[in-house]
Image: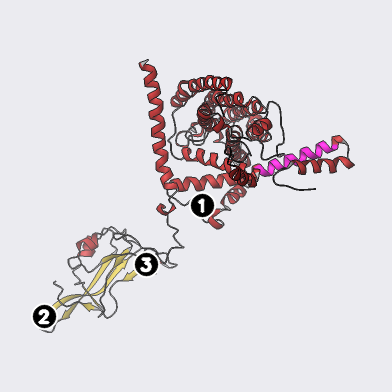
């Protein structure tokens, strides 16, 4: 078995064949699902912890602080310590809370994150699910998350939670449109909804370069709307600390709070992963037209490094404006969506269609 | 037409102000030397407090074990907490005149609010605020200090 970090299909095929030799197809499928499930769980836990650390550090540097420095070298073990602390906390049930919905809500939120992660193409052959409607699947699955948020707010029997959940609902339902439409702009250029095909179509050049003006506009709209959909600052009024203590997860503690917390960071990962897949070429290396030497050097860097490099770039951009801009009011958020992002987006789709019909893209 | 122009202008202006804001934070992010947080226990050797920092009341002595305190008691009168007790003695000078001097200048750090009134009102500038701030100790009797060193006397030429 030739293990290559450039192409993971050999590895997955080898696992599949070695399992098939001794087991029935049903058992093989069950084992493969378990492997994928454990891999995604591990990835979510580790990457979520790392993102929390990265956010604290990045935020600190933006504010001329040092951030966590005490636990481990440069505070690297800080989030692990925090996580252990969260695991040991008591689970509190508020008085007269809707017990069933209260316990269900964090699971809905985290399961949605897991589902969305399953279609992320990490590298060649490292994609759990490859539907022919991949983009549609992502947008529809992420929109289920708002149900978890609404349930959490409703069942907590707390006015702050309820107000936070209502705000979150209004916000996510509006910004869903912009996320979907900006992705649709790129689907017009790609001509496919399948994620692996979209990535393969970018082997000659990333869509943000090939689609030039409308692609750049769509990218920025996607990043803004994606930030709003994940309830991150400056659109974090669902959990505005100064007014609503913690919004919809005020009453949650221990591992249930950790679920909400982790889901927030995994959603951040999903938004940037989708931005990378659709606009920045997925795991494809950077290629410039006919500079053969340059292209060969770029090919030498493994796809998984390319993917995570781009992910961190987008995550850094999102963190940058989270820690720069003040929080918007609810009317400002809705005005931004309905008066600015949506008209620009619709105009952008028409522009992209004209460009694709006339073949004015690269 | 005018409304459309105003709409486009508002978008451009809005984006421009946002970019300006991000420039400020970006400037900080890529210059870690500007970080003002201090790692306190680690930088203890190099730590310098600012000039006007009030750590504790001290009485500076020169190399001949001489201070400027005349024992007038103005600091004791001015202290709002009663943290200073000046215990004077009467000494007879060479010319036979009786003179007031200090036996002990007792300072209760545990009661002191570091208000600086004693230092401000000292007519001879005998007491100043020190920079030391690590006052944690195991026994509170150590918080009562005698500021004038044993065997010290008043500096020559200090006007009473």
Disc 1 versus disc 3: nearer the observer: 1
Residue at disc 1, secondary structure: loop
Q: Quadrant of the C terminus of chain A?
A: top right
Chain letter of the residue beneath label 1 in the structure image: A
Queried whether the magenta region covers residue A34, the answer comes back as: yes
In the rendered view, does A293 fall on the left or right side of B14? right
- Give the labeled residue for mark 2: B97
The x, y position of residue A164, in whole percent, is: 52, 30
The answer to whether any part of residue A158 appears in the image is no
What is the number of the mark on residue B143?
Answer: 3
Disc 1 versus disc 2: nearer the observer: 1
- Give the labeled residue for mark 1: A68
Tags 1 and 3 on a common chain: no
Would you identify the image quadrant in which residue A355 lies? top right
Residue at 39% x, 21% y is: B7
Queried whether the magenta region covers residue A94, the answer comes back as: no
The answer to whether any part of residue B149 appears in the image is yes
The mark that comes first in sequence, 2 or 3, is 2
State yes or no: discs 2 and 3 in contact (Cβ < 8 Å): no
Residue at 45% x, 47% y is: B29
Judge by depth and name the residue closer to the eye, B82 or A27.
A27
The x, y position of residue B18, in whole percent, is: 41, 34
Chain letter of the residue beneath label 2 in the structure image: B
Q: Which residues are magenta?
A: A27-43
Q: Vertical placement of A71 versus B97: above or below?
A: above
The x, y position of residue A292, in whole percent, is: 61, 42
């Amino acid at each position: 078995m030739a293990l290559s970090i450039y192409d993971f299909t050999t590895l997955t095929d080898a696992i599949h064949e070695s399992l098939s030799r001794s087991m029935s197809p049903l058992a093989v499928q069950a084992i493969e699902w378990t492997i994928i499930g454990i891999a995604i769980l591990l990835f979510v836990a580790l990457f979520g912890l790392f993102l929390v650390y990265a956010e604290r550090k990045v935020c600190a540097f933006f504010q001329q602080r040092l951030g966590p420095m005490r636990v481990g070298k440069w505070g690297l073990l800080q989030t692990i310590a925090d996580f252990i602390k969260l695991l040991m906390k008591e689970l509190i049930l508020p008085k007269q809370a809707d017990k069933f919905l209260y316990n269900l809500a964090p699971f809905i939120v985290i399961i949605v994150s897991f589902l969305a992660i399953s279609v992320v193409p990490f590298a060649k052959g490292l994609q759990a699910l490859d539907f022919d409607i991949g983009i549609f699947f992502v947008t529809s699955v992420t929109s289920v998350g708002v149900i978890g948020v609404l349930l959490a707010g409703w069942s907590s029997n707390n006015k702050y939670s309820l107000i936070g959940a209502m705000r979150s609902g209004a916000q996510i339902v509006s910004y869903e449109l912009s996320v979907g439409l900006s992705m649709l702009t790129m689907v017009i250029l790609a001509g496919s909804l399948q994620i692996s095909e979209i990535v393969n179509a970018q082997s000659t050049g990333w869509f943000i370069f090939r689609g030039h003006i409308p692609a750049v506009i769509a990218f920025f709209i996607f990043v803004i709307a994606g930030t709003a959909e994940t309830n991150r600052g400056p659109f974090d009024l669902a959990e505005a600390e100064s007014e609503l203590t913690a919004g919809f997860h005020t009453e949650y503690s221990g591992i249930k709070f950790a679920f909400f917390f982790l889901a927030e960071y995994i959603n951040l990962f999903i938004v940037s992963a989708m931005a990378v897949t659709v606009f920045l070429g997925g795991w494809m290396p950077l290629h410039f037209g006919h500079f053969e030497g340059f292209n060969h050097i770029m090919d030498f860097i493994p796809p998984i490094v390319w993917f995570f490099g781009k992910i961190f770039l987008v995550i850094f951009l999102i963190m940058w404006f989270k820690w720069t801009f003040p929080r918007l009011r609810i009317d400002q958020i809705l005005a931004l969506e309905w008066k600015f992002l949506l008209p620009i987006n619709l105009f952008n789709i028409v522009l992209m269609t004209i460009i694709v019909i006339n073949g004015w893209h690269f | 037409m005018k409304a459309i122009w105003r709409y486009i202008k508002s978008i451009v202006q809005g984006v421009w102000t946002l970019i300006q804001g991000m420039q400020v934070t970006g400037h900080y992010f890529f210059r870690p030397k500007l970080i003002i947080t201090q790692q306190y226990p680690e930088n203890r050797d190099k730590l310098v407090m600012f000039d006007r920092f009030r750590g504790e009341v001290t009485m500076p002595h020169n190399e001949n074990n001489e201070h400027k305190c005349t024992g007038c008691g103005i600091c004791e009168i001015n202290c709002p907490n009663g943290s200073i007790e000046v215990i004077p003695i009467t000494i007879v000078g060479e010319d036979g005149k009786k003179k007031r001097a200090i036996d002990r200048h007792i300072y209760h750090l545990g009661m002191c609010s570091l208000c600086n009134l004693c230092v401000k009102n000292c007519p001879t500038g005998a007491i100043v605020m020190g920079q030391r701030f690590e006052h944690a100790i195991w026994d509170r009797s150590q918080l009562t200090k005698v500021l004038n060193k044993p065997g010290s006397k008043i500096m020559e030429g200090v006007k009473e």
